[in-house]
Image (spheres, rainbow, N blue to C red):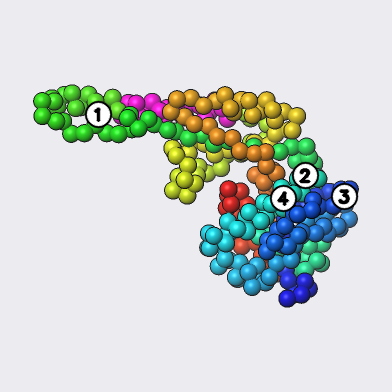
């Protein structure tokens, strides 16, 4: 299939910059992305097959979790590569245009929003912070039924103690979340709280009680990391990920997007890449 028959997948928008994309940067289907400049903005694009990325097949593809995760990883790899040479505005997973003209219309129609977002993100990175409640196994288990020689009062006392221990773990986790979020927000330019992750999907031990992202100036990142690393307590685990390109703070670019079939060919309510592939 020739390039002219393929759709245009838009990974990110940037300002014009000197140099080229890093060698070895590969996107969806293993194809190196390219830069398409329009005025004072640049789109990072790749060619993708319509049988996967046109509107109807894309909606079906998004139900395939393996395909979705592979696509998200390829998307993220391009964003990571472009982040080494400039500050990108990552676009939502599966932002697709019909052709180069559609990409130019996307840049033109969203020009002011893209410029504002790039100004807000310049020199900043995203850090992810997750807090998990981890009741101790001995405290978490309900006492066994009273054995011979054990009074019912002793059994009820042990059961009440186990329940109070679990309640204490939840209270500590809740208090730590509130305190940590307030402290980190003072060091961040912005913060957002995502839906807690389901342990059945993430595979992480414990119960996720905080799933937050913070937009942090690079010059303040070292102190931010120190605060997170010092936050864990018994029964409460804190995890830090990043630094990432600021996916969670690029939502301004999604507002008032052209309808499918005009500039973008399909977006199909796709999740952000870090939701799908991390």
Disc nearest the viewer among 2 and 4: 2
Contact, mark 1 vs mark 2 (Cβ under 8 Å): no
Residue indicated by mark 1: 159
Image point (70%, 30%), residue name: 221
Q: Secondary structure at mark 3?
A: loop
Q: CA distance from mark 3 to mark 1?
A: 66 Å
Q: Secondary structure at mark 4?
A: helix
Q: Compared to 94, does 192 lie above or below?
A: above
Earlier sequence position, callout 1 versus callout 2: 2
In depth, the one of 76 and 108 nearer the eye is: 76
Query: How dense is the environment of label 2, judged by Cα within 10 Å: few (below 14), some, or many (20 and up)?
Result: few
Earlier sequence position, callout 4 versus callout 1: 4
Q: Compared to 249, does 154 lie above or below?
A: above
In depth, the one of 222 and 178 nearer the eye is: 222
Earlier sequence position, callout 3 versus callout 4: 3
Checking the image for residue 19, the label placed there is: 3
Q: Compared to 164, does 190 lie above or below?
A: below
Q: Quadrant of residue 227?
A: top right
Q: Secondary structure at mark 2?
A: loop
On the question of residue 262 being in view, the answer is no
Where residue 252 appears, x then y in whole percent? 71, 48
Q: CA distance from mark 3 to mark 4?
A: 16 Å
Residue indicated by mark 4: 79
Image point (48%, 25%), residue name: 233
Q: CA distance from mark 4 to mark 1?
A: 51 Å
Disc nearest the viewer among 1 and 2: 2
Check if residue 169 falls in the magenta segment: yes
Please give left or right for residue 273 compared with residue 256 in the image. Answer: left
Checking the image for residue 84, the label placed there is: 2
Magenta stretch in the rendered image: 163-182
Q: CA distance from mark 2 to mark 4?
A: 9 Å
Contact, mark 4 vs mark 1 (Cβ under 8 Å): no
């Amino acid at each position: 299939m020739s390039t002219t028959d393929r759709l245009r997948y838009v990974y990110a928008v940037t300002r014009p910059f000197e140099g080229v994309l890093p060698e070895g940067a590969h996107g969806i289907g293993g194809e190196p992305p390219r830069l398409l400049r329009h005025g004072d903005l640049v789109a990072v694009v790749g060619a993708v097959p319509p049988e996967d990325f046109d509107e109807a097949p894309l909606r079906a593809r998004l139900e395939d979790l393996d395909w979705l995760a592979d696509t998200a990883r390829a998307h993220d790899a391009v964003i990571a590569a472009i982040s080494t040479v400039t500050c990108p505005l990552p676009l939502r997973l599966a932002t697709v245009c019909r052709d180069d003209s559609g990409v130019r219309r996307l840049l033109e129609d969203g020009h002011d929003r893209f410029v504002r977002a790039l100004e807000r993100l310049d020199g900043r990175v995203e850090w992810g912070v997750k807090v998990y409640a981890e009741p101790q196994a001995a405290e978490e288990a309900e006492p066994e039924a009273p054995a011979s020689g054990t009074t019912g009062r002793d059994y009820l006392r042990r059961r009440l103690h186990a329940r109070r221990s679990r309640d204490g773990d939840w209270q500590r986790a809740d208090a730590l979340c509130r305190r940590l979020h307030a402290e980190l927000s003072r060091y961040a330019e912005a913060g957002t709280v995502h839906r807690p992750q389901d342990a059945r999907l993430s595979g992480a031990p414990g119960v996720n009680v905080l799933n937050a992202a913070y937009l942090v100036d690079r010059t303040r990142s070292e102190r931010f990391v120190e605060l997170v690393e010092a936050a864990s307590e018994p029964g409460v685990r804190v995890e830090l990920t990043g630094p990432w390109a600021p996916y969670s703070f690029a939502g301004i670019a999604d507002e008032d997007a052209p309808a499918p079939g005009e500039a973008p060919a399909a977006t199909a309510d796709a999740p952000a890449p870090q939701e799908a592939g991390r």
